[in-house]
């Protein structure tokens, strides 16, 4: 699909390059791993199947939080679902606000973008930008036009925006994969259940297996990436806070900013995230364990509640904690007297933290004044482009235009 052709070949090349530069459709999902596709209990076309937080499969909707497998193979949290789509929408609104902070009118932005060089503007951000560091530095130093410098700044900070959104998509997929694996009938794929050792009657056992490692890896990933999401959100908010009238610098100010500085930014202070809930503190503590000490449980055990050779439910133990902090004694950081189950608690923790993130982003959006009176001037410039983007959004598709001199 191409935009409507302008009158001249030169304009045609500029418009095509413009489309390539401004487009970044949100790619919300990626494929699940093959083990989930081959679940013995899930047959394609057999209707909706639900999984509880303890890996219990059911064809009827369970009470409380649970996961359901969508048509694209992703397991999504329900009752209530995480506010991932709303967070992405909030970032898109802030993206539009950043344009209004930097450019006086939509026409000024489009005119500056049309006259720019994709390889320079996206150097160091996009792997398809064919410009090395030295050439970029020379081009940036030679820039005289204030609007071109603002364009560089816009794309530098928009990178933080898109990274944060991309992390949200990865969390969604990895969280679903962890709970789908928890619901597999057998975590030891090469050893049939009837050949495994089970205690008679009702009992508990711990298992260590490659699928168990996968469950732990996905849970650890969600914990770590949630904090990474907050880090990049803080970078973005710090850069938004740095925009001042008449600013001509193209350099991002957030190189060393992490989430710890969120509450000190002009736009981020006195928002829900700056209060540091117990759930957020606990996620940060668990993240420190996974990053600096390998994992939350060095043995990566999955516990099973069994009745003879039948597995009823599974859970993952989490260390004792109080007010968001793990209870420690000297170098011992893993006490397990509280019977905390990470699989039961993590969705609530993520819901609280991401909910606070959404509320904070919405509050920041309200704090930034709307400067463009006619927003239609932004969308009407290239109607075919935004029509294609709308279709891609509705279809959850990844859409990308590439530059071409062909008419």
Image (spheres, rainbow, N blue to C red):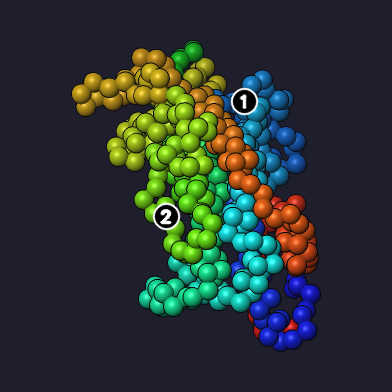
Q: Which residue is mark 2?
A: 253
- From this viewpoint, which residue is outermost toward the left? 330
Q: Give the quarter of the image for residue 390.
A: bottom right
- Say left or right for 102 vs 375: left
Give the answer, above or below, for where 382 lies relative to 130. above
- From this viewpoint, which residue is outermost toward the top? 201
Pointers 1 and 2 in contact (C-beta within 8 Å): no
Q: Closer to the camera, 298 or 155?
A: 155
Q: How many marks?
A: 2
Q: Give the quarter of the image for residue 11.
A: bottom right
Residue at 44% from the left image edge and 24% from the top image edge = 278
Residue at 50% from the left image edge and 48% from the top image edge = 241
Where is residue 121? Give x, y as percent.
52, 70
Q: Closer to the camera, 77 or 210?
A: 77
Q: CA distance from mark 1 to mark 2?
A: 40 Å
Please tell me whether mark 1 sits on a helix, a strand or a loop: loop
Query: Which mark is on residue 65?
Result: 1
- Say left or right for 254 vs 349: left
Give the answer, above or below, for where 97 lies relative to 284. below
- From this viewpoint, which residue is outermost toward the front? 246
Where is residue 149? Give x, y as percent.
51, 68
Residue at 75% from the left image edge and 67% from the top image edge = 381
Where is residue 371? Give x, y as percent.
67, 53
Please tell me whether mark 2 sits on a helix, a strand or a loop: loop
Q: Is residue 223 visible?
A: no
- Say left or right for 202 vs 32: left
> Depth-wise, is mark 1 or mark 2 nearer the camera?
2
Q: Closer to the camera, 220 or 177?
A: 220
Are there few (<14), some (14-19), or many (20+) residues within 10 Å of tag 1?
some
Residue at 75% from the left image edge and 73% from the top image edge = 2
Q: Is residue 104 visible?
A: yes
User: Quick one: quadrant of the N terminus?
Assistant: bottom right
């Amino acid at each position: 699909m191409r935009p409507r052709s302008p009158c001249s070949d030169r304009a045609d090349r500029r418009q095509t390059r413009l489309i390539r530069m401004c487009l970044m459709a949100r790619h919300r999902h990626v494929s699940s791993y093959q083990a989930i596709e081959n679940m013995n209990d899930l047959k394609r076309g057999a209707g909706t199947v639900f999984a509880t937080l303890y890996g219990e499969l059911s064809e009827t909707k369970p009470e409380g939080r649970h996961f359901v497998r969508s048509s694209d193979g992703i397991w999504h949290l329900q009752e209530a679902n995480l506010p991932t789509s709303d967070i992405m929408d909030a970032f898109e609104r802030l993206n539009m606000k950043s344009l209004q902070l930097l450019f006086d009118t939509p026409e000024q932005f489009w005119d500056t973008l049309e006259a720019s060089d994709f390889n320079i503007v996206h150097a160091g951000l996009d792997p398809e930008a064919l410009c090395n560091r030295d050439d970029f530095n020379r081009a940036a130093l030679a820039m005289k036009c204030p609007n071109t410098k603002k364009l560089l700044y816009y794309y530098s900070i928009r990178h933080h925006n898109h990274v944060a959104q991309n992390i949200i998509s990865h969390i969604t997929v990895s969280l679903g994969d962890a709970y789908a694996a928890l619901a597999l009938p057998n975590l030891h794929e090469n050893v049939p259940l009837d050949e495994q050792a089970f205690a008679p009657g009702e009992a508990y056992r711990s298992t260590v297996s490659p699928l168990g490692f996968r469950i732990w890896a996905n849970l650890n990933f969600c914990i770590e990436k949630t904090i990474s999401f907050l880090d990049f959100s803080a970078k973005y908010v710090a850069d938004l806070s740095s925009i001042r009238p008449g600013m001509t610098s193209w350099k991002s100010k957030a190189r060393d900013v992490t989430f710890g500085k969120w509450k000190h930014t002009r736009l981020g202070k006195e928002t829900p995230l700056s209060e540091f809930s117990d759930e957020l503190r606990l996620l940060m503590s668990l993240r420190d364990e996974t990053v600096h000490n390998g994992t939350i449980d060095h043995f990566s055990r999955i516990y099973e509640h069994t009745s003879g050779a039948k597995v009823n439910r599974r859970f993952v133990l989490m260390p004792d904690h109080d007010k968001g902090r793990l209870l420690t004694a000297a170098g011992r950081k893993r006490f397990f007297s509280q019977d905390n189950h990470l699989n039961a608690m993590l969705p609530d923790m993520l819901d609280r933290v991401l909910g606070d993130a959404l509320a904070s982003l919405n509050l920041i959006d309200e704090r930034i004044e709307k400067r463009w009176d006619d927003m239609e001037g932004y969308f009407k410039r290239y109607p075919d482009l935004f029509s294609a983007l709308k279709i891609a959004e509705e279809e959850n598709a990844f859409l990308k235009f590439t530059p071409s001199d062909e008419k």
